[in-house]
Image (cartoon, grey):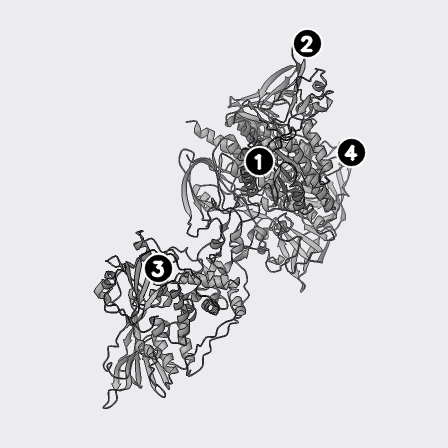
Amino acid sequence: MSATRSPEGSGTNEPRLAVYVCQCGGNIGDYIDTQHVIDVVRDLPGVQVARDAMFTCSDSNQQEMIDDIARESLDGFVVACCSPKLHTFTFRGVAERAGVNPYRVTQVNLREQCSWTHTDDPAGATRKAIRLVTAGVARACHGTALEPVQVSTTPCVAVIGGGVAGMRAAIGLADVGLDVCLVELEAELGGWTGRFGELFPRGVSGRALVRRMRQEIASRPGIEVLTGARVVGKSGTYGNYRVTIAIGDATTERTVGQIVVATGFDAYEPVAGEFGYGSPGVVTLPEFRRLLDETDGPIVHDGRTVRSIAYIYCVGSRTDGHAYCSRYCCSAAAQASLLVADRDPDLQQYHLYRDLRTYGRNEVLFGESRRRGSYYLRFADDDPPQVSVDGEGVSITVHDLLTAGAELTVAADLLVLVTGMVPRPEDDLIAALKLPVGRDGFLNEIHPKLRPVETVVDGVLIAGACQAPKTVAESVASGMAAAAQAAAVLKRGVASLDPQVAIVHDAACDGCGECVAACPFGAIALAGSDGHAVATISASGCKGCGACTPVCPIGAIDLQGYTDEQVRAMIVGLLDGGVR
Amino acid sequence: MDYDALVVGSGIGGMETAIKLGDMGYRVLVVEKEPSVGGRMVLLSKVFPTLDCASCIATPKMAATVHHPNVTVVTDSEVTAVARTGDGGFRVRVHTRPRYVDPAACTGCRKCEEACTVAVPDEWNGEMVSRRAAYIAYPQAIPQKALIERPGTSPCTDACPAGIKAHGYVSLVRSGRYEEAFRLILDATPLVGTLGAACYAPCESACTRGELEGPVAIRRLKRFVAERHYAGPDGPGVTPPVPNGKRVAVVGSGPAGLTAAWQLARAGYAVHVFEAGPDAGGFLRQAIPAYRLPAEVLDRDLANLAAVGVTISTDSPVGDPAALRADGYDAVLVATGTPRSRRLGIPGEERAGVATGLAFLRDVRAGRAPDLAGRHVVVVGGGNVAVDAARTAARLGAREVTVAYRRSRGEMPAHPAEVDDALAEGVRILFQVAPVDVTGQEGSAGTAGLRCSRMALGEPDGSGRLIPIPVEGSEFDIPCDLVIAAVGLAPADELAASLPVHPDGTAAVDPRTLQGPQGWLFVAGDAVTGPSDIAHAVGQGRRAAHAIDCWLQGREPDAFAPLDDRLPAVDRTSVLARQRTYAARPRQLPPAALRDEPRDFSRVEPSIGEQEAREAAGRCLDCGVCSECGECLAACPADAIDLAMRGEDRSLDVGAVVVATGYRLFPADLKPQYGYGRFPNVITAMQMERLLAPTRPYTSVLRPSDGRIPLRVAYVMCTGSRDESVGNPLCSKFCCMYSLKQNELLMGVLRFAELTVHYIDIRAVGKGYDEFFEQAKGMGVTFVKGRVAAIRETPEGNLVLRYEDVDRGVVGEADYDLVVLAVGVLPNHDLDRLLSEAGIAFDDFAYIAEADEDYSPAATTIPGIFVAGAVSGPRDIPESIVHAGAAALQVAAHLERRSVPA
């Protein structure tokens, strides 16, 4: 791959390199003297070109890099900018377009690991930057060309969870010609949505929506539905995962190219006594919706016609233990009050809220609810309403900020606790798929903007409310977005795998097996005959995590792209940078 | 099919849709109306709740879009038609505007930008700073290629019959590049000084500034640059070109002939000019009075011709052009003008006291001025010659000068300013008066007076002017000593001998090529157009030179770009509408020194100095944005600039259409009580984004009025959202979050600032959003619940907010240095007409309807047309990206359905 090479000296190839230092607008340039960094590293061995740029990732700078590579016959380059999480693929793409092996690119993180962390010390940040870039150049000097592992992929997707997100993802995947295995824990598809009637903001019935999706699924032979089933294991490699599914006592396996996790949420269950929960006349929002959806005519609770309803918002949301906002509940409660008003226009309704978050179009629900007679009272974050329950009903005392903090007492026949969403306790699935979990307990995407449906586990995608609280329409959209991502990979039929994987120097390996135990991906096995078993590493199974290399007692394993030689050179670079 | 899918708009939604579809293997065309892909996100500071650098996320998406092997991107383009084809696909039309820079050649070096003489508000920086007319939108723009903003030709340039770039030299003067301004005019004609002195300046009549306090003094700027250049030691500074071996004869040395000679000589022709009179210059020398055009000005202009090798023979009338052809000239241009005066056609015209206007002026310029002291002169006619004659007569001591014109003032062909000046100098003008008889003195050939008749105005004639009809019995006598007849001029009689002529004696040639039937013979100037003015004659000369060059070089005569291929003029109303207010700037230039009964031929209009010239040029509104000054052409090292580029239209067949045209920001001036547009320190949040962005215009956050660092900053939430009074009841969804983000960033930038957010509800509804809200509170941002009623400005430029504090139950007022309006979003109507015609449905809030959003998000009411991102309702970036994924999947499903025959 690499073009010209300068004559070898003292046993090491000295490649021809360029160094680019990014100002990242002001993100780096405000704190690090990039020109000074350039001036110092310009003289490092191998460096043919050194320059800084306002945005190294900008298209114009990419073109300059390509021009430099052609003009100077470069073998690779070092770009000192932001985290590799952001731009590894950007700069590998530049290398590819310039005809250089993409693995001859070294990215040095000057932003997250230097300028942003040392905003109070520009001189120190500049000195540190010189060391970091020197280490990067050292790594690049010992780099070699690597070729990605090409694997053909299985045109089938496992969708875990048969709520609206999972069902819609399955339908969409089938529509673009991919097979689907839809795995649902319950006996029937439908999830939460199937339990409800009219949904906001369009008034579509949840039950009807689920019915429609079930019919669409039934009409697509490419979708296999497994109900009463759970995914218990995953093996194989990217593009061809083997998923183990337990149905009752039996297990079965499917080979799939991608996995979409759409396991949904749980409704927050108040603890006994929380705002009177557990007492007669106190229900959660889902319980209240069931009451509304399953009856007609005047609203009757515990055999009594309800003449007044109070709602307390943010129960189980924006509180200790559940710091997040559950997003859907304000709108859902406002909509519920409209359903109530439809059935009994004279019924008194009181909404006790903190911030009313009927965002976007849902604002219409809030306006309509007020127009139709609902009273809205606002309580302070640190001053929640007090609830007392007696035989006559529920009495709620609140300091209403909308009437200058006046203490008001609301007597209601029914108190609805507007409960939020909480993450489902899917510990087994999380363990089986190694799913990343965020601080809020929901599953985490790689990057909310760059890769919002992907996880750090390649080929495992997330959709719906398992990621964060979402409405039905939002869940459906995210299911389709995950399906689009899966299709974007699988419609090509082949996938390229990162060649930065561990390799064993067979001659040195004595088959001790330490590495087999250390590998978190099960990618290493002992193999061999005539009494000399050596470790073999599956290139498609290895994730390049590096867990095996340090445990090898005799140093027989190297991680390509981060060989011992490279890491040693980087350490020297870090120590010597700018000091020499 | 040309493309599987068309994606309209390359914001974050459009890019994501295109990339996903491209990844799936479909061929995608992305059409972006702006000069760069990327939409708005790339302009933001950071993004919530992660505080990632926005451009660091957007830039790789932009690069990935344009470099995707399956994605083609066209910028500067708009979809102008969408029609269903019946097979589930669409035929679309895409119009691409010219950038006037060849993207293949442009290296993005920005030399053009440095050279550009026009600065306009930079829309990519919230119009808080300026950019050039030649520019690259912003540092991360893709393509990183320059473009030139040219919505049309500026009215002044458009009005110039000589095709001189009036706006160009005005903007050069404004930039202090006087020599370049001189050269720009010199490129059109050698008569820079002449035009600066005596042009009737149709440019000024067209000037948009005329609708304010008065037009830019364009002609006097030309005079300024000419005088400044001629005061220096250099000649024209034009190197004579390499001779091309061909010879051209020009007959007549008026403005048409001299301009043609100049252009031809610079193109390498050996040019010889034959002038019938004793001095070169034609009417410039003979007919225009010296108080308007002194001889030395013309002489300086004539020296330009000598510098490029043009030779002139005077006293050399040419009877027959064919003789010149026989002498070896490859082409002959006849530019002999209109030397013949029309007759009054009344009795007594042959008397001694009757002269033609032309003969009178000619005699005066030649030093044979009659002594008019104490005499009464009557001039007949209403044209420029008549007015010139009248003013000249006054200078020769005439006791009384009367002009008799048969129509009314409004129809007078003379330039209105000349008429004004004549009146100021004491000339009397009789309107609707026509001569009937020149009465003689008893027993003498001399003149005793002029009998005239009053005229009534009848029906309009062919030219639209009313036909004068004599009023019976209205005759009266004006006693006078001299009658000057200036009722029209006509071409020389000899013209008819060489080629066909019209009844009025003008040459009947192709008005585009000016070529006679012989091929080698061309005619230009007043001999073709009839009596006109210097600027028209210069235009004719340029056209003739171009035609002669084409003919002699064996090229098909193409359009003469400076006159025939100008962009349509920009509409003056739209220019004035760019700004809400204009300061009237009283004119500072010294006025013409007019006095009653002038007695000498000194110039009436004084020169202007550099200060005055800069001030005058500074009034220019840059109507056409690009001034065509040509500085970029000279500066571009890659020769990439081509002002002749024109837009193009393409028709394409596509399988599906994705509308991703995004949202429209609420125009903050629709809430007048907040003072946006009137109070400089009330800005929008989008402007604050730019102040905080890594590519920000200043090093810190400064307030606009005085550049001070603000210490008290207020945010007014829900500006234009949740507000029935502006017709938008919806919540815009992301304003709370971007305001929280800006407050967190401001905490870092303005460490000592007090930050207050006036809000209704903080809608932090998204992953990590409420935590972000708590973080902002923890950092010390003050939140006050309640609407802001009104904002007023203090004399120091501070702002007093009148607001409700709901939590405390009070109405209060507070003083701030800077107020940021958290503006909401409205539907983008860019494609509404087009999509309505295609039959698409809109929702109650005028967004494109996603009628089946619960099952089919991104689908519209037309199968095959989808939406992505904020075009169908407020969506933040993560939501737009997810929505775009859904759109991509829908498109793929649609395409797969199409590919399976039913």
Question: Pointer 4: what residue?
Answer: A273
The quarter holding residue A388 reads top right
Rounded to the nearest angstrom, the CA distance separating label 3 from label 1 is: 53 Å
Of circles 3 and 2, which is in front? 3
Rounded to the nearest angstrom, the CA distance separating label 2 from label 1 is: 46 Å
Regarding mark 4 in the picture, which secondary structure is present there?
Answer: loop
Instruction: Decide: few, some or many residues near mark 2? Use Cα within 10 Å; few <14, some 14-19, many ≥20.
Output: few
Rounded to the nearest angstrom, the CA distance separating label 3 from label 2 is: 97 Å
Q: Is residue B583 rendered to the left or right of residue B477?
A: right
Question: Pointer 2: what residue?
Answer: A531
Tags 2 and 1 on a common chain: yes
Mark closer to the chain start, 2 or 1:
1
| Image quarter hosting the C terminus of chain A | top right
Q: Are marks 4 and 2 in contact (CB under 8 Å)?
A: no
Rounded to the nearest angstrom, the CA distance separating label 4 from label 3 is: 100 Å
User: On what subunit does the disc labeled 2 rest?
Assistant: A
Q: Which mark is residue B264?
A: 3
